Amino acid sequence: MNRQALRAERVITPQGERAATVVIHDGKIETVADYGFDPACPVEHLQGVLMPGLVDTHVHINEPGRTDWEGFDTATHAAAAGGITTLVDMPLNCIPVTTSAEALAAKLESVTGKLWVDCGYWGGATADNLGQLPALLKAGVLGVKSFTIHSGIEEFQAVDEEQLLQAMRLLAQAGLPHLVHAELDLHHSELEPIGRSYQKFLESRPRAWENEAIAMVIRVMRQLREEGLDPKAHIVHLSSSDALELIRKARAEGLKLTAETCPHYLTLAAETIPDGGTLYKCCPPIREAHNRDLLWQGLKAGVIDCIVSDHSPCTPELKSLEQGDLGEAWGGISALQFGLSLIWTEGQKRGFTLQDLARLMARRPAEIAGLDERKGCIEVGFDADFCVFDPEAELKVTPWVIKHKHKISPYLGKTLQGLVTQTWLRGQLIYKDDEYVGKARGRSLLMR
C-alpha cells in the first residue's frame, strides 16, 4: 500500500487533542506529526474530529445459527456507520454457542466475506464445558464469558461459585480475562407475573442480584490469588451503582477487576420508560435516574473502565411489541451504531470531552480485550483505524438510518448530537457520508 496522510485541526491522541498530520503506511500509523508537516505523500484534509476507531467488546452477532436475529454482515455494516472498527463477538446467542474449539471454527468459517470491520471472539465458560476450555483458549478466543444466572437459552448454562473458580483458574493460567454477567438470585425469588408493568420488571431484577454476584467474583479472585495466580475478571454491562464501592475496594486490594457499562444505562432512566415498552427491556434492567447519575460519577472516577454497546438484537416478534409483555419479551437493546452519538449527547453535559470518550470507547476496551498493542488509539505502530466525528451535527434516529438487521431500537425518534462522517480501517476508507466504500475488508483477530 502506498503511503498517505490524513490532516485535521482536531486529532485525539493519547497525549491530548491537537492539530496534526497522521501518516499511514501499509495500514499502520507511521507518524503523528505537526499540522504543517510535509509527509511527501498524498494528504487528505478532513473536516471534523479525527478519533481512533472505536472498539466495542460486547456485541451479540448471533451467527451462525440465529442469523434471523442479526449476522456479521449487518452487524459490521452498523459498526462501520458508528465509527467502530473493532468488534468482539459474544459466545451466545449463536448456534452452536462458542463453548468449544469446534464451535469457534464454525464461527470463523461463517464470517468469510462478511466482515466490514475487524472482529475478535469471546468464548464461553459454562457449567458443562470446563473440560473443553483449554482447547477453546488455544484456538484463539480473547477470553471467556460466564453467566451467574440463567442466560436466556438452555445451551449456555450458568455457573455456580465452584465452577466459576475452576474456569477462572484456567483463564488466569492463560493470562486471559474472564467476563461475567453478574446477577445472582440467592433467594430463588418468585414474583407475580410482570405483564406490561416496567416497575414490576425492574423489581424482578434488583440491584442486590448484581451486588451479590460481583461479591462472589471478588471472593473467587481472592482465592486464586492465594493460590499464587493473578486472575483478570471483567464485569459486563454494570447497571447497579451500589456495586461501585465493591469494585473500588477490590482494586485497592490489587485485584485485576474491571467493569463496563452501556449507553442505555447512561442515557435512559426507569422513570421515563412506558409500561409495555419492551424495546427498553434488557438484563440487568435500566434503573432510576439517580442510579444513572452515579454510574456517570463512576466513569469520571475511573471505577468503570469503559462503555460498550451490549448490542443484543432479536426478531421484532420476540420483542412482544404488540402485546407489550415485559415478562415474555426477549431482553436486549439494539443500538450498535449510535453509541458515540448517544454518549456525546449526554456526556458533554456532564463535563466529558472527546478525549474522555476516546479512552472509554476505544483505548480501554482494547486493553481489556488484549488488543492494546494495535487497536484503540492514534499512535505510531498502531493500526490506522479512525473515526471522523462531527460533534456539532445532529442525527435523528429513524428506521431508514439504522444499519443493523431489524429497524427497531428504544432510540427511534430521538435526535442526537454528533455524527460519524467517515470510518477508516487499517488505512482504507470504508464508510463516508452514509455510503460504504469498497468491499468487506475486516479480519478475524485471534489470540495466538
Image (cartoon, helix red, strand yellow):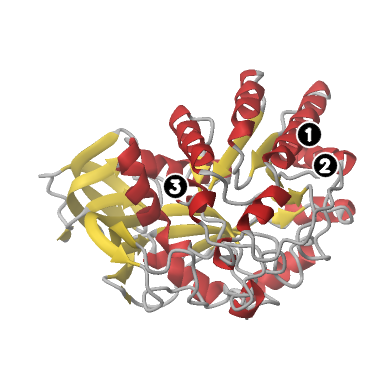
Please tell me the numbered disc located at residue 243: none
Nearest the viewer among 101 and 191 is: 191
* Secondary element at image label 3: helix
Residue at the extreme left of the image, as rendered: 36
Q: In whole angstroms, how far apart are the C-alphas of marks 3 and 1?
A: 27 Å
Task: Inspect the image, locate mark 2, and give the three-letter code of the amino acid beneath it.
Answer: Leu
Q: Which of marks 3 and 1 is in front?
A: 1
Give the residue displayed 64% in from the left and 21% down from the top: 249
| Crowdedness near tag 1: few (<14), some (14–19) or many (≥20) residues, C-alpha within 10 Å | some
**Rendering coords of residue 168 (x, y %):** 78, 40
Secondary structure of residue under mark 1: helix
Q: Which numbered disc, 2 or 1, marks the residue closer to the eye?
A: 1
Mark 3 neighbour class, 10 Å CA radius: few under 14, some 14 to 19, many 20 or more: many
- Going from N to C along the chain, the mark reached first, 3 or 1, is 1
N-term-proximal mark, 2 vs 3: 2
N-term mark: 2 or 1: 2
In the rendered image, residue 377, in percent from the top left (x then y), is placed at 38, 44
- How many tags in the picture? 3
* The N terminus lies in quadrant: bottom left
Q: Nearer the viewer, residue 180 or 362?
A: 180
Q: What residue would you read off at disc 3?
A: 361
Task: Give, as a three-letter code, the residue at label 1.
Answer: Met
Tell me if residue 260 comes above or below residue 86 in the rendering.
Answer: above
Task: Mark yes or no: residue 281 visible.
Answer: yes
In the image: residue 166, left or right of residue 182 = right
Inter-mark Cα distance, 2 to 3: 28 Å
Residue highlighted by disc 1: 216
Query: Would you name the residue on which mark 2 appears?
Result: 164
Q: Residue at x 32, y 59 (%)?
A: 416
The spot of residue 131 in percent (x, y) is 89, 52
Q: Is residue 218 left or right of residue 259?
A: right
Residue at mark 2 to residue at mark 1: CA–CA distance: 9 Å
